[in-house]
């Protein structure tokens, strides 16, 4: 892949962010197991609300691994990468087994989403459909894909498939040079995606 050197450089940078990786169960302040598609500010303390039913809220909400994309580890990694003085504001939603976390950065929106499929086969179908819809998406190959199916979509987004989870990181709303190191939106998306995947691998 023509961007492989860039991916490997971003992967090296991402490895520096992993010291704060914790178990998935510690994820998502302000987005703890939402039971509807309403948004929640990720910077607030998560509260468990009585749903009025006997079923536990966690059974209806996103898996813990998905909530990690809006959790403290990811917030800290974004802050570190962009040299932010405070955690970025974010909102999350959960609908149709898709957990989405939108970070409102000064330069534009940065969106991370996780689709939970019924099984790996269904997840592969979802991943392949996304790649087909992206048009001129290019596979991420070699060491850069960490051993997972992955591709880069136009203008700065990356998608990885792990088991029954499809991780999409979209930086297409950001300018051509991101952060103090002036990386491309795609490299920034890749860097954040790989730190999330590393946490998933460490805490399956």
Image (cartoon, helix red, strand yellow):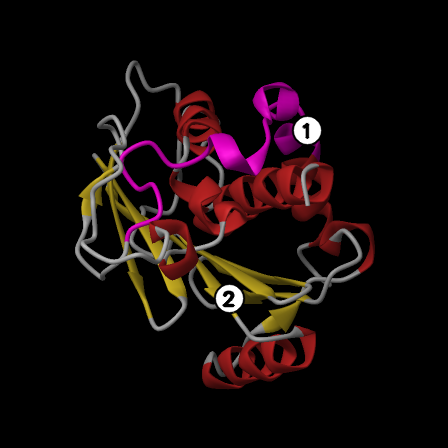
Q: Relative to 122, is 51 above or below?
A: above
Q: Is residue 79 left or right of residue 66?
A: left
Q: Nearer the viewer, mark 1 or mark 2?
A: 2
- Label 2 packing within 10 angstroms: few (<14), some (14-19), many (20+): many
Q: Position of residue 121 (x, y in %)?
A: 68, 81
Q: Relative to 183, is 79 above or below?
A: above
Q: Is residue 81 left or right of residue 110?
A: right
Residue 176, numbered circle = none
- Residue positioned 24% across, 58% down in the render: 53
Q: Relative to 44, is 185 above or below?
A: below
Residue placed furthest toward the front: 54
Residue pointed to by mark 2: 116
Count of marks, rendered view: 2
Q: Does the stretch in magenta take in 93?
A: no
Q: Which image quadrant for residue 149? A: bottom right
Q: Is residue 128 left or right of residue 145?
A: left
Q: Position of residue 189 (x, y in %)?
A: 49, 47
Residue 15, numbered circle = 1
Q: Position of residue 55 (x, y in %)?
A: 35, 58
Report the front residue among 38 and 110. 38
Stretch of the chain drawn in magenta: 12-34
- Label 2: element kind: strand
- Label 1: element kind: helix
- Residue positioned 81% across, 51% down in the render: 143
Q: Considering only order in the chain, which callout, 2 or 1, is on the residue closer to the N terminus?
A: 1
- Label 1 packing within 10 angstroms: few (<14), some (14-19), many (20+): few
Separation of disc 1 and disc 2 at Cα? 26 Å
Q: Position of residue 51 (x, y in %)?
A: 21, 52
- Residue positioned 47% across, 66% down in the render: 115
Report the front residue among 106 and 56. 56
* Quarter placement of the N terminus: bottom right
């Amino acid at each position: 892949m023509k961007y492989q050197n860039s991916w490997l450089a971003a992967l090296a940078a991402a490895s520096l962010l992993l010291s704060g990786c914790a178990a998935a169960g510690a994820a998502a302040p302000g987005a703890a197991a939402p039971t509807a598609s309403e948004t929640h500010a990720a910077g607030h303390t998560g509260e468990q609300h009585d749903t009025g039913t006997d079923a536990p809220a966690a059974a209806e909400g996103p898996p813990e691994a998905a909530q990690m994309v809006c959790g403290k580890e990811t917030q800290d990694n974004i802050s570190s990468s962009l040299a932010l003085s405070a955690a970025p504001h974010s909102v999350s939603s959960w609908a149709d087994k898709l957990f989405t976390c939108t970070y409102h950065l000064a330069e534009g929106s940065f969106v991370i989403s996780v689709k939970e499929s019924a099984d790996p086969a269904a997840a592969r179908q979802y991943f392949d459909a996304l790649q087909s819809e992206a048009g001129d998406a290019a596979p991420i190959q070699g060491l850069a894909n960490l051993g997972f199916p992955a591709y880069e979509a136009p203008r700065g987004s990356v998608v990885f498939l792990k088991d029954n989870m499809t991780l999409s990181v979209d930086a297409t709303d950001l300018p051509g040079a991101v952060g103090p190191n002036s990386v491309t939106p795609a490299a920034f998306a890749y860097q954040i995606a790989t730190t999330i995947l590393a946490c998933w691998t460490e805490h399956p």
